[in-house]
Image: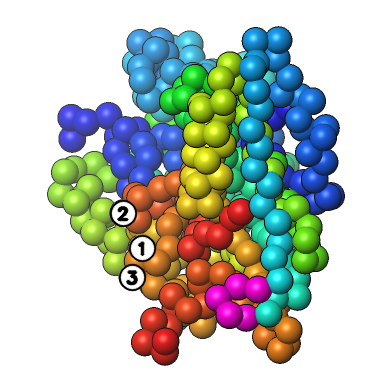
Amino acid sequence: MRTDKATLQYHGQPQLRWAFELLSKVCAATFVSVRPDQRDDGTRAGLPQIVDRQPGIGPIAGISAALQEHPKAAWLVLACDLPFLTERTLHHLIAHRDPNKVATAYRSAHDNLPEPLCAIWEPAAREPVLAYLASGKQCPRKFLINSATALLDLPERQALDNVNTVEEFGSATAALKRPGGVSKTVRVQYYAILREQAGRSEETLDTSASTPAELYAELRKRHPFQLTAEQLQVALNADFSDWQTPLKHGDTVVFIPPVAGG
Amino acid sequence: MKAFSFSQAPLTPDVYRAELADPAAGGYAAFEGWVRNHNEGHAVTRLEYEAFEALANKEGERIVTEAVARFGVLRAACVHRVGSLAIGDLAVWVGVSSRHRAEAFAACRYIIDEVKHRVPIWKKEHYANGDSGWVNCERCAHPHEH
């Protein structure tokens, strides 16, 4: 695939931005690992960055740069080509972290080997990683296999399936769109008649709806809303929106009944 | 004062009016919307206003900015009540100061008309017979019943 996988869109925004926001919910600080030549590209510029110190050796360059930049921090390292990843998978990793090991990682659902790019790398990994690189080795997976790594089973089997070909991108996009495909979490706020009919002023829910139109159709099955979508307007994140705008993970949605100010 | 804002407390037009004073102004026009005791044949006892304030503040400010640009007035502002209101209470205030009267009236009219149609504010009427209803929402939801 010739495309920069960070720019692919599965959730209505570049995957790098989506992964960054997901990590920001569970980490104290979040950075994008970049090669020196990627610092100013449109997807990565403007985000806090950690620049590779040994570019050209693959993802372990980013891991070693992070461990050197903040030696006391543990790093939740995440690839940005994982369209099926969920916040739940990250929470599970963090909840089962073993800080006395060099790293905590998931076993691959395909070959049971550690997945280095959705793993917590401890400060204790810094010295052995530098020694590993000094010996001319570069494979982060082999590093974890040969280190004291805590290994976990994935709570969601497909969470770390990545995308490497145009065909895989197509099938991942289709899978995410299917009902019951990987869901996103949105907050819905209710006002006036919708608040009374929903019996609440807001709710947070997981949905596979890809647009506000689909979300409202889904909510009409759960709440006795009598207004049709044609009678409403919709706002995303406190701005008027189109009914067909792709919903993103973390969006706040408001359905606006006919107004009556004055 | 802000171009558009909400108030939980009773509105104070004299205070707002003073904010619009301008040495270049030759006049001031205001509109006050009051709570009346009837609507479409029903005796109304009180009202509740509710707003989606995060968006309403932005849209209200856009309307006032449009009015200033379109009519060339000096200053303009709008304040809307939220909460529970009694008959006779002031629900909304619009004020405009300008060099000449024509554009002051026109801008005032524009702001109140646009606010009623565009800003996410809702009004629930409580009726003398004990019923209540969201204006523009209850009947439009059952068009075949009327």
The magenta stretch is: B38-42
**What residue does disc 1 label?**
A213
Q: Is A246 placed above or below A28 here?
A: below
**Reading the chain from its start, which is encountered first: label 2 or label 3?**
3
Front disc: 3 or 1 = 1
User: Magenta: predominant secondary structure element?
Assistant: strand
Residue type at mark 2: give it: Gln
The local crowd at label 1, few if under 14, some if 14 to 19, many if 20 or more residues have their Cα within 10 Å, is: some
Name the subunit of mark 3: A
**In the rendering, which numbered label is found on residue A244?**
2
Q: How many marks?
A: 3
Res. A153 visible in picture: no
Q: Please tell me which residue lies in front, A181 or A124.
A: A181
Of helix, strand and loop, which one carries label 2?
A: loop
Residue depicted at 55% across the width and 76% down the height: B40
**What residue does disc 3 label?**
A179
Residue type at mark 1: give it: Ala
User: What x and y, as percent, mark residue A110?
Assistant: 34, 57
Name which quarter of the figure residue A181 lies in. Answer: bottom left
Of helix, strand and loop, which one carries label 3?
A: loop
Name the subunit of mark 1: A
Name which quarter of the figure residue A238 lies in. Answer: top right
Do residues under tags 2 and 3 come within 8 Å of each other at their CB atoms? no
Q: Please tell me which residue lies in front, A230 or A5.
A: A230
User: What x and y, as percent, mark residue A67?
Assistant: 60, 23
Front disc: 2 or 3 = 2
Residue type at mark 3: give it: Pro
Q: Is residue A124 left or right of residue A210?
A: right
Q: Is residue A212 left or right of residue B33?
A: left
